[in-house]
Amino acid sequence: MRIVGTKQQVRDAVAAGRGEGKTIGLVPTLGALHEGHLSLMRRSVADCDLTVVSVFVNPTQFGPGEDLDEYPRDLEGDASACEAIGVDLLFAPTVEEMYADDASTVVSVSELTEGLCGAYRPGHFDGVTTVVCKLLNIVLPDRAYFGEKDYQQLVVIRRMVRDLDIPVEVVGCPTVREDDGLALSSRNRYLSEEERAAAPALHQALQRGAEAAREGATGREVERVVARALAQEPLFRPQYIQAVHPETLKPLGDEAGPMVIAAAAHLGGTRLIDNVRVEG
Ligand code: PAF
């Protein structure tokens, strides 16, 4: 595996692969890789001839007061994990390499970014779509892999790719969980022992909501079920609990049907998100 830091090195390596008729997979990450990321990489290595992983703590998707400076960084550990899986190229650029000083273009997806996390993290999705668009332009992959844990992000990226005619297949991959149901996240390492013990309550509450949805409950009823279940764990401070349409992300309100039940909640200083999808 090669580790490179410049866009030109990525372009050259990918062009060489293309010259040999290889298909290209991209797994964009913020680093601090865990089993969730590794599952995306395994999928890319299985599907594509050449897998590129980017490790870049993208400053433009962190808001003021968020954890940009504290965000865990471990390039050495990330590189060994990538190598063990069979990743071909690790792209770890600096902020200066990614953004010109006077960069003034933003890729912004409207509507889908207004609710859920978008309502509480102004500018976050503009940062995500701008950097993902740039990474897609740098790597020009056939497929790009994203986790369903960041469900809104996945839907937003699919919309960007469709709207801008970016020639890539966006592949969504299932959330990877600890045995007790906690969704893997690089931020889980911020949790104290007591918070870690409380953390699975978020997924358990969402599952209660999913059961109610399968029995025909409306979006609003489902949200109440989840809120009551989560209130059993007093360490959690919910930010939002919403049952939304899986594609439009509009709140279901008094309607029942297929939905994604998504929640964000603080546990001490750590913000956790999770979701479950309920088919029709
Ligand atoms: O989900 C993430 O890790 C990031 O938002 C992404 C897609 C790598 C963009 O920086």
Image (cartoon, helix red, strand yellow):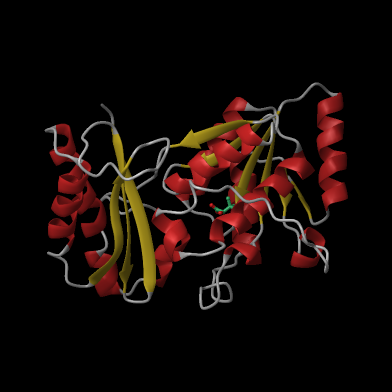
Q: Residue drawn 24% across and 31% down?
A: 257
Q: Residue drawn 28% across and 31% down?
A: 258
Q: Quadrant of residue 139?
A: top right
Where residue 227 sits: x, y (%)?
18, 58
Q: Quadrant of residue 64?
A: bottom right
Name the outermost residue toward the top.
Answer: 21
> Which image quadrant: the N terminus?
top right
> Which image quadrant: the C terminus?
top left
Where residue 71 sits: x, y (%)?
54, 70
* Residue 185 in sight from this viewpoint: no
Q: Residue drawn 66% across and 41% down?
A: 87
Where residue 81 sits: x, y (%)?
58, 50
Q: Is residue 30 above or below residue 141?
A: below
Q: Residue drawn 78% across and 44% down?
A: 138
In this image, 111 relative to 11: left or right? left
How many marks overall?
0
* Residue 221 in sight from this viewpoint: yes
